[in-house]
Structures are given as C-alpha cells and as structure tokens.
Amino acid sequence: MVYMEKIIKISTPLLDDVIKELKAGDEVYISGKIYTARDMAHSRLIDLIQKGEKLPIDLKGNVIYYAGPTPPKEGQVIGSIGPTTSGRMDPFAPKLLNAGLKGMIGKGNRSKEVIESIIKNRGIYFVTIGGAGALISKSIKSSKIICYEDLGTEAIRELVVEDFPAIVAIDSLGNNLYEIGIDRYRKI
Amino acid sequence: MKDRIILFNELKNKIYELILKTSYDLPSDVYIAIEESIKKEESSLGISILHKLLKNADIAKSEKMPICQDTGTAVFFIEMGEKVKIKGGSIKDAIFEATKDAYDKGYLRKSMVKDPIFDRTNTNTNLPPIIHFDIIEGEKIKIKFAPKGGGAENMSSLKMFKPLDTEEAITNFVVDTVLKAGGNPCPPIIIGIGIGGNFEESAILAKKALFRKIGERNSNPKYAKLEEKIKNAVNNTGIGPQGLGGRITCLDLFIEYFPCHIASLPVAINLNCHAARHGEIEI
C-alpha cells in the first residue's frame, strides 16, 4: 500500500476555529510554544488551582506535552523526548482544561471524564509516537525550565517546537481514534 | 580446576559499555521485524508510524542518543560461573558503579525514586538496578541487560490459574491484557510469558522470555505452537501500531515454562515496547 502523506500545519496557542476543523485521525505538525508536565508537576499545578493561586504557566489556549526528556549532550537543545502514558494524568486533566488549557499531547487512551471535558471545553488530544524520542527531539528548537527544577526530568519546560509530529486522537467533538481505529481492524 | 580471576575494573567497564550500546542501538532482529511488519500492515497511519520507528532507530544509532527517553529501570540477569573470582570488588558493586556512571555520562534519563510511597524523590543516579543472580558451572560470566521502561511494564499482568484451566483460558488472558493495555505499552509490542513455577518464578520467566530473538520459537513444539496461536490472536485485536488501529499489534511472543505445584498454574505476562532494548555479553 502506498502511503500518501497529508499533514496539517497548526500553531500554538490553539484557536477554537483551528481546533474545530481537526478530526480524529488527522496527522498534524505543531509549531510554537508547548509545555512539558508529568505526574508530579500536574499534582503541584492542581494544588495551586485549589488554593486559588497564580499558575507558573499561562494555560489559556496552550498545550501540555506529557514528557520527561533525557539530558542534552553538549550542543544539543534537548535529549530524547517521546510521550509518556497520558492516562496517569487523567485525574488532573479536566481541572486544567477548565482553567483554559486547550491541547494535550501524550500516548494512550483517555478516561470518560477527560473526553467529556474535552467536548465541554472544546479542547483536543493529540498523540505522538511513543518510543520515537530521538526523532521527536529534532522538532524541538529551544527548551528552558520554567519551574519545579527539583523534579529533574519531570520539571515544567517551555519548548519551542517546529513541525512537531502528532496525530489527532480525540477531537473536540469527542471522536476517539483509539475506538474508531481499533474497531476498523479488530477480528476477534 | 583453578579459579579464574576477573579484574573489577575490566568487569565494570564492560557493563558500562553494554548499558550504553543497549540504550542507543535497537537490536537488529527488532529493526528487521519492524521493516517486515510494514509489508503486512494494512493501516496507512500504522505504516507511517512504523516508518518513523525505523527513522528513530537510525537517528539514535548514528547520533548515540537514547532510542527512547525512558531509559528504564536497569535490569540485569547474571549467570556467574562457579570458578570465577572478581579481584578488587564484588560483581554487585561493579553493576552499581557501571549503572551510575553510564546513566550519568551517557546522558540517559534517571527514572528511579527513593521510596515507592513515602518519598518519591528521584535518586538522580538511576540506582538501584534490579539484579537476578544465578550460579552456573564453569569459568565465565554471562551478563544480560535490559533497560525496562515504565509504559509497558505498567501494563504487565500476573494471574494464578486453576491447575486444569486450558490454553484457551491463557490465550484469553493474554488477549485481554493486550486489549486493556491499548496504546500505553507503545505497540507493536513484544510479549514475554512465564507459565508455571510459582508466583515470582512465573514473572521472572516472563521477563527472561523478552531476551529471545524475534522469530526464535520455544524448543518444545507444543509451546512453539502455543506461541504462534496466541500471537495470531493478539494480532487480530486490531490495536495496531501505537494502539491507533491496524494489523501489527505484536512483533513476537515468547513463552518460557517451568514445572509447578499440583495446585497451581501461574501465568505472568510481561509486555515490552517496540523499543525492545536488550543486550548481553559473556566474559
């Protein structure tokens, strides 16, 4: 089978008009700023929201990438940086979407609560390729730690990305590629 | 027969090199299996993903970068010849020191926390490793290393079956585990299954099974047939590359077995991602 590559270019912050055009299964290249955060950083952000305090990053229209990189070598912007399992962030994600977050990038399916929150907040969930951290690092043009440096690889980083490869897994209407895609090929 | 002396530093350096090579170079059998799977995949998105996995492996190898940012828990299987003596330190210290140095100087991610519940701060050294020791005859040491990432490990499973449960029940257990795992363990996966022994032995067998080369069947024809059967069932789940739908859910499936108690039939499933890093050396 010949694979015809059709990739939609988008940039951050994500606008509602752009999000509503994206459908589950679309391949995209993302450019602009995105932020990394994993379990510990999520837990701290939620604590701040619950206390009514200011967050270290502006969530409005922004995208969080569930990732913790390897350390960069001399002359490198960043080390390998593929996605971690998104499901672990499910308990936190709706609160961040309610606070203005628009996009998430990770790997693996999301909970019912997250999908409902995506629909309600007109958000979007992208996946990128788990285990392709060396390839993905090539799309990252700069990286700086914004906060939680004590967490090491789990610190929140601001990444400037150019043509970061991703796939729309759950679109703003709640269409879910993890269900649609698997159903198409399931034989048992 | 006289004892064979191996110098501590020589041993440590060889383990250090093993860790780095394993973290940067995808084993060639896995690379070839991904190439072959492109011909069988029906999903165009799946094909696109499989091509990117090969490109990733090429970049990692040529630039000496980790194949995956999750450079794992450092897992070792050591088969120590009874005639071997280490001069200048213990084998355990050699493994600890090599792990610490390789994760630091090789730019690998440190992913170990001090305490699972009460103090989840990073040890910042990737210590401690997990080491399984075995004493064998002879004067050689065999060292097997696998950096095991969290995504696939978290989706692994163990079940104590009833003694007369059938291979159908075991097949269903594997299929259910893979379906539940979906995209989390980074398919196409490699599946290690340990059958028999006892609770912990089945899990160790499952992990050991992951060291086999793609396409290498169990030497017992009954288990070889069961491997093929379960592998086909898994590839009919439709999960596909990255869990986004397709034909290629697993690249291979390996079973290791061991005699067990009259009352028991333990089955452990250890999943591995497509970045199935493992290496071994003999000294």
Image (cartoon, helix red, strand yellow):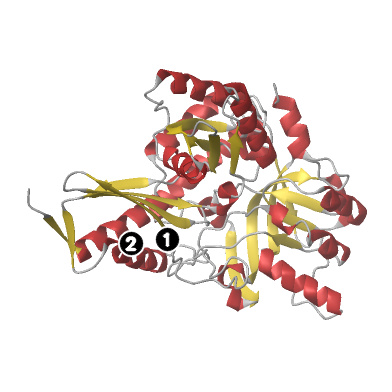
Q: Left of B36 or right of it: where is B234?
A: right
Res B31 seen here:
yes
Q: Is residue B171 above or below residue B158?
A: above
Name the residue at 39% across, 22% down. Answer: B220
The structure residue drawn at horizontal position 54% and vertical position 36%, both measured from the top left corner, is B266
| Badge 1 vs badge 2, beta-carbon distance below 8 Å | yes
Q: Nearer the viewer, residue A118 or B214?
A: B214
Q: Gap between marks 1 and 2, in whole Å? A: 8 Å
Q: Residues within 10 Å of mark 2 (few under 14, many from 20)?
A: many
> Would residue B232 be visible to someone looking at this image?
no
Question: Which residue type carries mark 2?
Answer: Ile
Where A68 falls versus A83 (above or below)?
Answer: below
The front one of A49 and A31 is A49
Which chain is home to disc 2?
A: B
Q: Is residue A109 above or below residue B260?
A: below
- Please give the residue where the numbered disc 2 appears in the rendered image: B95
What residue did someone put label 1 on?
B129
Say left or right for A174 vs B174: right
In percent of width and height, residue A87 lies at 72, 52
Callout 1 crowding tier (Cα within 10 Å): few <14, some 14–19, many ≥20: some
Q: Is residue B13 above or below residue B37?
A: below
Image coordinates of residue A95 in percent, x first then y, are 84, 64
Measured from the top left, where is residue A147 in percent x and y? Answer: 66, 77
Q: Report which quarter residue B122 is drawn in.
A: bottom right
Query: Image quadrant of residue A177?
Result: top right
- Secondary structure beneath disc 2? helix
Q: Residue at x 58, y 54 (%)?
A: A82
Nearest to N terminus: mark 1 or mark 2: 2
Quick one: SS at disc 1?
A: loop
